[in-house]
């Protein structure tokens, strides 16, 4: 079936380190978004990025739609970056629904 | 803008009782989604509305679940009768659908439901 796979599943960083999170998807997409779920459970939209590269402060994201993957870069990590990062895709074949990956759980140590 | 507003934030109820969750989407958004999050199943889409019309309810677990969107600024998700396995965090989200895709999706704070 159609799948959204995220790696790594878990990541521990020392404050100040950089990291790359990956999202692989198995079919063509109309839409790809990255979300951060903080330790209090809030889901925050980070990027709407069906293709190309975007940057927002210490975060940036790149989607290569033809190769079916997206990357989220976190530079100079801070403890407030802790939480779970999800990518979500809207498949061309299935219409409007955003399907979420299983997430990468990030812990940033002071 | 106040963002997507959900109520209540927490709901504790006994098995067999009716539960109603409420959502006010961001003004101007034409798409509304109900998601459920559990440790076992992650984030699951339950139902999706566009212009107040249910488009896809294939994620609704069973007939005990129903959702309505009587107007562009209000939606409800009802569980009747509730069961312990319905315990989860229920999120409402909204976005603006343009042509063939949805733009950025914004989530409410969620309702933590516990069915005893």
Image: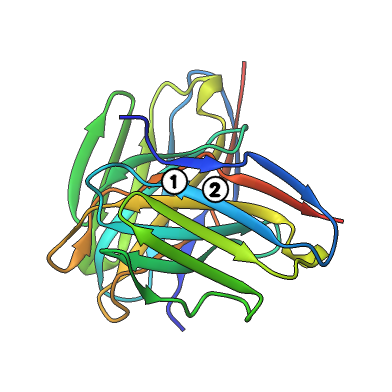
Q: Which x, y percent locates residue B33?
A: 41, 59
Q: Earlier in the sequence, mark 1 or mark 2?
A: 1
Q: Quarter holding the C terminus of chain A?
A: top right
- Subunit under mark 1: A
User: Do marks 1 and 2 share a chain?
Assistant: yes
Coloring basis for residues: rainbow
- The residue furthest front is B70
The secondary structure type at the circle numbered 1 is strand
Q: Which x, y percent locates residue A38?
A: 55, 34
- The residue shown at (55%, 61%) is B77
Relative to A20, residue A88 above or below = below
Q: Give the Cα separation between the discs numbered 1 and 2.
A: 7 Å
Relative to B90, residue A28 above or below = below
The secondary structure type at the circle numbered 2 is strand
Q: Residues within 10 Å of mark 1 (few under 14, many from 20)?
A: many
Q: Nearer the viewer, mark 1 or mark 2?
A: 2
- Label 1 sits on residue: A21
- Label 2 sits on residue: A104
Could one spot residue B72 in this view of the protein? yes
Q: Give the side of residue B70 with respect to residue B96, left or right.
A: right
The quadrant where residue A105 appears: top right
Q: Are marks 1 and 2 in contact (CB under 8 Å)?
A: yes
């Amino acid at each position: 079936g159609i799948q959204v796979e995220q790696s790594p599943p878990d990541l521990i960083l020392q404050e100040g380190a950089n990291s790359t999170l990956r999202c692989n998807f198995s079919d063509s997409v109309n839409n790809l978004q990255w979300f951060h779920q903080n330790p209090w459970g809030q889901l925050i939209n980070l990027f709407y990025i069906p293709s190309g590269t975007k940057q927002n402060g210490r975060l940036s994201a790149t989607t290569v739609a033809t190769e079916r993957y997206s990357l989220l870069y976190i530079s100079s990590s801070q403890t407030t970056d802790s939480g779970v990062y999800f990518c979500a895709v809207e498949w061309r074949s299935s219409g409007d629904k955003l399907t979420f990956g299983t997430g990468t759980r990030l812990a940033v140590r002071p | 803008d106040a963002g997507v507003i959900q109520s209540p934030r927490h709901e504790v109820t006994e098995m067999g009782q009716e539960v109603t969750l409420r959502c006010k989407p961001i003004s101007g958004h034409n798409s509304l989604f109900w998601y459920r999050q559990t440790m076992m199943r992650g984030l699951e889409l339950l139902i999706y509305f566009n212009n107040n019309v249910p488009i896809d309810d294939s994620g609704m677990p069973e007939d005990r679940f129903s959702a309505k969107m009587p107007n562009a600024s209000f939606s409800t998700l009802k569980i009747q009768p509730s069961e312990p396995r319905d315990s989860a965090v229920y999120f409402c989200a909204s976005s603006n659908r343009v042509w063939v895709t949805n733009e950025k999706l914004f989530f409410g704070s969620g309702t933590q439901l516990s069915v005893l």
